[in-house]
Every structure is written in structure tokens, then in C-alpha cells.
Amino acid sequence: MTSQRILEAARTLFAARGYRATSMQSIADQVGITKAALYYHFDSKEEILRRLTVPLLDELEEVLAEAESGQDAERVRWRAIEGYVDVHLRHRDTLTMLVRDMTLLVQAPIADRFRTAIALANELVAAGGGLEERVRACQVVAGLADPVLLFRDEPPERLRALILDGARALLEAPPVPRVAGLPRGRNGGRPARLSPEQIAQARALHDGGLGVEEVAARFEVSRATMYRHLKN
């Protein structure tokens, strides 16, 4: 079907070159049709973008609504997380396209729908908890999509398992105790170093699957400081 071939060609070109750098003529050339024939199927490049993006948003909203309809809070949480990851894996190329041109993500109605979906995902993962649970839920949700983009050449099944393992490690990790009198950085900023006990905890969290940036945030130190402690 010509319209589907056009969408596939546009998705590939948008992901490789960027939406704004891709012309209607280049899409027509990729499909092997005239520009006039392209306009017969789609009125504009904006219409092609909408057709590419709407399925992702529709599916994301659907899986989150389905998860929300559950009764058990823990089941709701994991249905939301798994559904969120699955939708992103199915739409890797569309996500790559959107991230390549970040300005697309601030345009209504795309931006409004994404913000609403992310807010609902955060709420479901927090499972009605307090500030600590809500902050951790935000960290989990924010970390579900990035690996899909950063490791887009990896097999989806393997990547899915690793992403879910990371989310589980973050959600099940015990709170990091704050040490009174921890040395602060210059001007009272973030600590310049950690205590031996905290270094051991940080290494355990990192070995358990947390990224350096996430571990650093837990201990309120810079990423450079955390790298130094993990390396030594």
C-alpha cells in the first residue's frame, strides 16, 4: 500500500536526517513516486508526522488506562511499567525521530499528550506513596525510555528484560541513610567525598544495576565524585 510505504520511508528519513531537514521531495524519491503522487496521499509533512506519532500516543494511553483499571497497587505499578516499555520498544524509530528534533516534543497537541501520559505513568508507579515514592517513581519512568533509544540495535527481548531489571532494582532498593556531618563541597554545596560506609552502599547499588547518575543523585554528590569513588 503506497500510503504505508510513504510512512515507513518518512519514519526512516526523519530518524536519520531529522524532521525539519527532510523534504517532501526526498520522501517521494525514497518511495520512488512523484512529489504530486505524494501529495495525493498526504496534504503536508505535518500530516505525515501526525500519522507517525498518533499510534505511539494511542498505544501509550491505552496501556496506562488498562493498568490504571486494576485493583492491586503493585500489579497496577508493574502493568504500567511493562506496558510503557513495550510501547516504546515497538515505536523505536518514531521515538528516535522525535528525539532527533526535540522541538517536536514541545509542540501541541503532541507535547500535551506526552506530558499527560508521563504524569499518569509517574502516578501509577508511585502507587499512592509519599514524596520519596513519587520521586523514585519519576526516576523509574524517566529511565524506561532512554535505554530504548541508546541501545536501539539490541534485541528487543533482551533489552526489555534489562530495563525491567533496572526498574525493579531501583524500586526495591532501600533508602540511602544520610550521614550527619558529611563533608560538603565548597560554598556549602554537594559533598566532595563520601564516607566508607556510603561508598560501599553506592557500589552495591551500582552493581545492582543503577546508573552512576542515579547513584550520585541518591547521595547528593556530583557524577564526577561518584565516578571517582566507584573507580577507586
Image: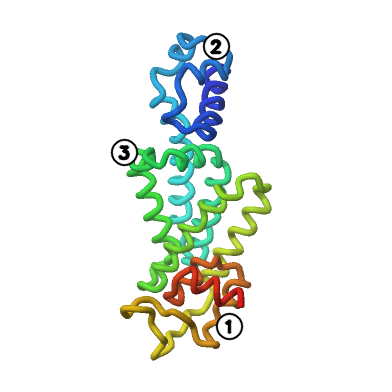
Q: What percent of the width, then of the height, locates residue 52?
A: 47, 32
Question: Mark 1 or mark 3, which is nearer to you?
Answer: 1
List the residue tagged with mark 3. Answer: 108
Mark 2 Cα-neighbour bin, 10 Å: few <14, some 14–19, many ≥20: some
Tell whether label 1 touches label 2 (CB within 8 Å): no
Q: What percent of the width, then of the height, locates residue 37?
A: 48, 10
Residue 200 bears which disc, if any? 1
**As shown in the figure, which amino acid type bears the numbered disc 2?**
Ile
Residue 169 bears which disc, if any? none
Q: In screen coordinates, is 154 left or right of 176? A: right
Q: Quadrant of the N terminus?
A: top right
Mark with earlier residue (1, 3): 3
Question: How far apart are labels 2 and 3 at the CA level?
Answer: 31 Å
**As shown in the figure, which amino acid type bears the numbered disc 1?**
Ala
Q: Residue at x 55, y 42 (%)?
A: 92
Q: Residue at x 51, y 9 (%)?
A: 34
Q: What percent of the width, then of the height, locates residue 22?
A: 46, 26
**As shown in the figure, which amino acid type bears the numbered disc 3?**
Ala
- Which secondary structure, mark 3? loop
Mark with earlier residue (2, 1): 2
- Which secondary structure, mark 1? helix
Q: Residue furthest front?
A: 186
In the image, residue 74 sits, relative to residue 104, either above or below, namely below
Mark with earlier residue (2, 3): 2
In the image, residue 75 sits, relative to residue 25, either above or below, namely below
Question: How far apart are labels 2 and 1 at the CA level?
Answer: 62 Å
Q: What percent of the width, then of the height, locates residue 134?
A: 39, 67
Question: How far apart are labels 1 and 3 at the CA level?
Answer: 46 Å
Q: Residue at x 48, y 36 (%)?
A: 55
Question: Mark 2 or mark 3, which is nearer to you?
Answer: 2
List the residue tagged with mark 2. Answer: 33
